[in-house]
Image: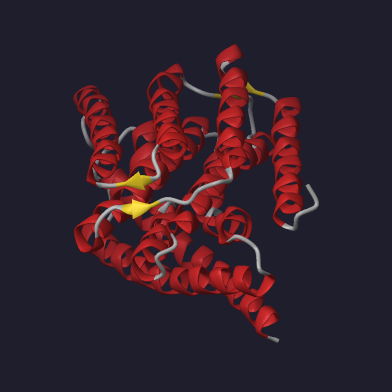
Amino acid sequence: MGLFFSFAVIILSSFFIYFFGKHFAESSSNIGDYLNLPKDVKGATLDAISSSAPELLVALYSVILFQKFEVGIGTITGSAIFNLLVIPGLCVFLAPMAFRVHKRVISRDAVFYVISIMALALFVFYLKSWGIVVALILLGIYFIYLLTIMGHTLKHQKENPGRKTRVKFWKEFSIFFLTFALIAAFTYLLTYHSIRISEFLKISPIFIAFTITAIATSVPDTIISLVNARKGSADDATSNVFGSNIFDILVGLGLPLLIYVFLKGPVQVAFMNFEIIIGLFVSTLIVLYFFLNDTVLDKKEGIVMLGLYVLFLVYITLLSVGVI
């Protein structure tokens, strides 16, 4: 009964995260319009941060409340692979025109994403204790990323003076924080019951985090990118994917780690499932190859990406139950 109850809570929490996340993302997007941000910048910052809120919250809860840092790593890497393979793979089929991406998105967002992946891989493979230095490096890379984006934003605003909008800033600002609070509450339930399921099934919580929790927290990312793709805004959709993953890795791990270090000291990271990090790295190389080839993602490549995710999910599931 406890197992089914936990699954039911996770399903309901996912629905409410989606529901409130949709309004959260809409208010974030409206704030971006009010600030006259270029589409790719809005996708990489406000859209990415708002859609990545659940992953950040899971990492915060898992480290500070449950002392299970591997849950945060599992959720963030699982969400990163989902965002990288599933979201663009689905967007190809919804885009009304060729899914072409501006080279700036590749040269800026993809480069910082690769740097983020490499930093995560190095820390996971070579460090068993993560302290303030790791946290500051992760957050420092994100700060440099933001500075780069600010440069593109200022250039855009000079070339495209802001137009009057009907956006009521303080109304959108209030919606932004109210929906964030509600997302935080349901994300706590999602995290708690994900850990309960892993304990009930006697498997590592990282597998539940990588699959169920990661997919549940990726719903807002998916909705935002699919809406942008349907509108024909490929740059928005792709920037959101890369921006979300950059935020997840650098801030989603860096910020909880920094808080924990100040409260209790360095975190001992018992992360033995290196195939997850390897899978994320390989997926990144494949997707970058597709984009760098001609900056256009076609339906065949979309099918390959979706197929890779299914295969990887099956492999992780079999690994978690001890079949392989």
Q: State left or right for residue 172 relative to residue 285.
A: left
Compared to residue 98, the image places residue 127 above or below, namely: below
Q: In this orientation, which residue lies closer to the viewer: 270 or 65?
A: 270
Q: In this orientation, which residue lies closer to the viewer: 223 or 193?
A: 193
Compared to residue 13, the image places residue 99 above or below, namely: above
Q: Residue at x 74, y 30 (%)?
A: 304
**Is residue 227 at all visible to an observer of this figure?**
no
Furthest residue toward right:
323
Furthest residue toward bottom:
1
Task: Please state, as top left, top right, bottom left or bottom right, where the N terminus lies in the image.
Answer: bottom right
User: What number of labels is visible?
Assistant: 0
Furthest residue toward top:
293
Q: How is the image coloured?
A: secondary structure
Q: Residue 149, percent across and down?
A: 28, 30
Residue 145: quadrant of the picture: top left
Q: Residue at x 28, y 53 (%)?
A: 266
**Is residue 120 at all visible to an observer of this figure?**
yes
Residue 100: quadrant of the picture: top right
Q: Residue 286, percent across and down?
A: 63, 24
Q: Residue at x 35, y 47 (%)?
A: 129
Q: Residue 319, percent across and down?
A: 72, 50
Q: State left or right for residue 200 relative to residue 114.
A: right
Q: In this orientation, which residue lies closer to the viewer: 161 or 318?
A: 318
Q: Residue 75, percent across and down?
A: 51, 53
Compared to residue 241, the image places residue 70 above or below, namely: below
Q: In this orientation, which residue lies closer to the viewer: 166 or 155?
A: 155
